[in-house]
Amino acid sequence: RLTNGGATFDQAAAADQDGDGLPAWQEYIAGTDPTNSASRFNASPALGNTFSWDSVSGRTYSVYWSTNLMNSFQPLATNILYPQGSYTNATPDARINFYRFKVRMQ
């Protein structure tokens, strides 16, 4: 087992060094700094139903959508590659829209 400062690799990956609620392995995938609580993935709404985020090289992004948090989310766009860092839902529902963003390594 790999160790770092007495902790195994698995322990270090599962730890939340900056106290923001995400383990280090999830922050690595998102492309954020696991030692800085201000470093986080943030998909910000712009005009209408356009969202933007800080795209990171080596990551693939997907956008999912639902009108009800009790229902499953449906894919709107998958395989969004760096450097693209935005998405517009051209056909939003007239009711409330909820969005989920996923990040994965390429």
Image: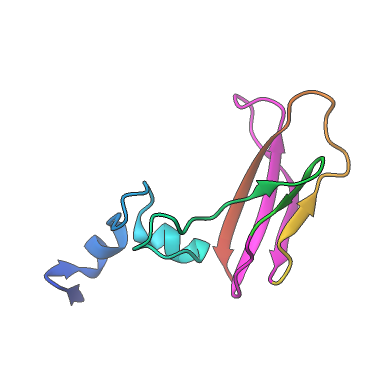
For this orientation, the residue located farthest to the right is 90
Residue 21 in the image, given as x and y percentages of width and height: 36, 46
Q: Is residue 64 magenta?
A: yes
Is residue 1 something that shows in the picture? Answer: no
Look at the image and tell me in which quarter the N terminus lies. bottom left
The residue sitting at 58% across, 58% down in the picture is 103
Residue 59 versus residue 44: which sits nearer the camera? 44
Magenta segment, which residues?
Answer: 54-82
Residue 21 versus residue 76: which sits nearer the camera? 21
Q: Is residue 71 magenta?
A: yes
Q: In the picture, residue 90 is in which quadrant?
A: top right
Is 5 on the left or on the right of 100, as rendered? left
Residue 94 in the image, given as x and y percentages of width and height: 85, 25
Residue 40 versus residue 38: which sits nearer the camera? 38
Q: How many marks?
A: 0
The residue sitting at 71% across, 62% down in the picture is 85
Residue 36 in the image, given as x and y percentages of width and height: 38, 61
Is 24 on the left or on the right of 106, as rendered? left
Is 77 on the left or on the right of 10, as rendered? right
The residue sitting at 63% across, 50% down in the picture is 43
